[in-house]
Image (cartoon, rainbow, N blue to C red):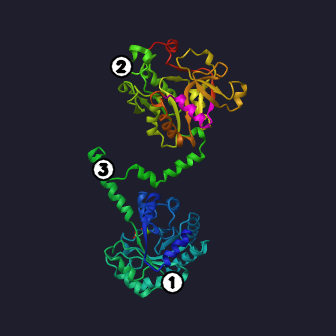
Amino acid sequence: MKKTTQLRQLLHSQQLEFLLEAHNGISAKIVEEAQFSGIWASGLGISAQLGVRDNNEASWTQVLEVVEFMSDATSIPILLDGDTGYGNFNNLRRLVKKLEQREIAGVCIEDKLFPKTNSFINGTTQPLADIAEFCGKIKAAKDAQSDDDFVVIARIEALIAGWGLTEALKRATAYTEAGADGILIHSALSVADEILAFKREWGDRTPVIIVPTKYYSTPTSIFQDYNFSIVIWANHLLRAAVTTMQTVAKTIHQEANLLSIEDTIVPVSEVFRLQDSAELLQAEQRYLPHSQRSVKTILLAASRGIEFGQLTETKPKCMLTLQGQPLLAQVVASYHKVGIKNITVVRGYQKQAVNLPNLDYVDNDRYDSTGELVSLATALETNSRTDSDLIIGYGDVLLKQYILQLLLENTSELAIVVDANWRNRSPRVRPDYVNCSLVNSTKAFYTQVFLREIGSNLSETEICGLWTGLLKVSGQIKQIFPEIVTKLLQQPLMESQGRIPDLINELVSQKCQIEVIYITGHWLDVDEIEDILKVGKFS
Ligand code: SPV
Ligand code: MG
C-alpha cells in the first residue's frame, strides 16, 4: 500500500495510533522494526543530529535530504515536521512536490513565523501566523499535491503561545475549512488539561494529533478515551541516543580502552544488519564480474619433505629458506600479488614452525598416517560455507603471478593449470601427468580444453602435460565439493594415501567438466632436489 494511503488510514482509523520520532535513516529503520506504523520526522531531531538549532538553521533542502534517506530505509509512512513551511505558500507548495517525489506521506505545518523557534523555548513569547496567511498556505499545499492521499496537518500553537482555547478552536475551524486533513494541537503544560479541553470542544470534526512530550505522565488510555487520532512520541530516540553517546564517550575517554563498554553496545554486525549489507553481498554475486568474486585459497603444507633429510628435522619443507625467505612466504606473496588475501594453510609436521603472519591455519595432526585428502577435508570444514571461489594449491609450489591470474579469470566451475612443457621438467617420483581433450596448440587457444584423466602411469602418447598442483572450484559444484571429498575418503586407502589427483579423477568420473589452462613453465615444484639446485641454496 502507498505510504500516503497508509498515513491517511492511520489518521482515520478507529483506534489510537502512534508515531515515533526518527531523525535519520538508521533511526527510521529502528522505528519500523519496533512495529510502529508510522514515523515522525521531527524538526528538533533532524536539526539536532545535524548539530544545529531547531530554528530553520538547516535549509529545507538539507531536511529533504535527511527525510529522503529515512524514506529509502523504510516502508512505513513518514509525517514530516515541516515547521512553518520554510517560507510562504510558494515555498510550501514546492516542498510538497519534493516530498511526494520522495514518498513522504504527509507534512505538518505550524502556525508560527519563519524562522521558527522550538515551541518549548519561550513558547509564550512566540508570535503566531496570521490566520488568513496560514490558510493560504494550507490551500497551496493541498493544491500542490498530486496524490490525493498525501496528508497536510495544520498544527496549532495558540495554547503554547498563551492565546487560549477560543483562539485555538477559531484557528482549527479556519484551517479545516482551508483543507487541512487533520489538526495537531500542541501544549507545553505538564498536564493534559488544555488539549483534553480542546478535544471536548472540537469533537470528531477532523482527526486530532497530540504530542505528549511535556504531559508524558498522562495515561495513554485517556487519549484513547478522548478519541484522539494519533499520538506522536516526538523526540525520544534522539534523546536516548544522546544519553547513550554521552555515557559511552565519557567512559571511553576516562578508561582509554573499550573493555567496559563493548558488551553494552551493539556489535558492528547489528549495524551491518540494519544497513542490509547481506543484500549487497547477494547482489555482488549476481552482478559483479567473475574475476572480482572473492576467492579463498587452501595451501596444503602438512608434509615434512623427507627427501630434504636433516634440513627438515625441525621444520617442514614449506618453511625452508630459499634465497633469504621461507618458501611458503614466497608462495603466499604471489597469491597476494593477484589480490588473494584469504589464505588457509594446512599444517601438520612441525606445525609450530609454520608461523607466518596474516594466514589462517588449520592442522592435520594425523599428517603422519594420512594423505593430502585428509588435509583438504580438514581445511574444508572451516572454508566450505562461503560464497567465495576456492583455489587449492601447495605451500611449496612457486608460481609466476600470471598463472594465478589466468586461474582467477577462468569462468569454469572447475579448472586446473597444466604445464604443456612437461618433457622439459625434471623427472619426478610420481609425476601428475594429464590426458586432455586437446593437446596444447594454437587451436587450444580458442577452444576449451577439458581434462580426461590425471595419473602417473599415462603412456607417452596420452600425456598432454604435467599438473602444476592448482585446482579451482567455484559455482554450484562448490556446494557439493566437501561432500565429494568426504565420500572419496571412505574408499579403500584414500584416508591414508589419497591425493588431490585422486579427487580430480573422481570429479571426472562423476562427469564434472574440468577445464584445462595450459601454461609452459614458470612454476617450480620444490619436491625435486634438482629443481632447488636450479634456484639457489636452501637452509
Ligand atoms: C519536533 O519534534 O520537532 C516538534 C515537536 O515540533 S516539539 O518539539 O514538541 O515542538
Ligand atoms: Mg518541530
Q: Dot 3 surroundings within 10 Å: few (below 14), some, or many (20 or more)?
A: some
Q: What are the residue bounds of the magenta stretch?
A: 498-516
Q: Earlier in the sequence, mark 3 or mark 2?
A: 3
The disc labelled 3 sits on which kind of residue?
Ile
Q: Nearer the viewer, mark 3 or mark 2?
A: 2
Instruction: Tell me the distance, in whole angstroms, between the alpha carbons under discs 3 and 1.
Output: 54 Å
User: Of helix, strand and loop, which one carries label 1?
Assistant: helix
Q: Dot 1 surroundings within 10 Å: few (below 14), some, or many (20 or more)?
A: some
Instruction: Tell me the distance, in whole angstroms, between the alpha carbons under discs 3 and 2.
Output: 45 Å
Judging by the rendered image, the residue that carries numbered circle 2 is: 314
Q: Is residue 499 magenta?
A: yes
85 to the left or right of 21: right
Proximity of marks 3 and 2: CB atoms separated by less than 8 Å: no
The picture quadrant for ligand 2 comes to: bottom left
Q: Dot 2 surroundings within 10 Å: few (below 14), some, or many (20 or more)?
A: some
Residue 294 image position (x, y, % from top left):
53, 39
Residue 16 image position (x, y, % from top left):
43, 77
The disc labelled 1 sits on which kind of residue?
Ala
Query: Mark 3: is the Cβ under 8 angstroms from ligand 1?
Result: no
Judging by the rendered image, the residue that carries numbered circle 1 is: 174
163 to the left or right of 279: left
Q: Is residue 432 magenta?
A: no
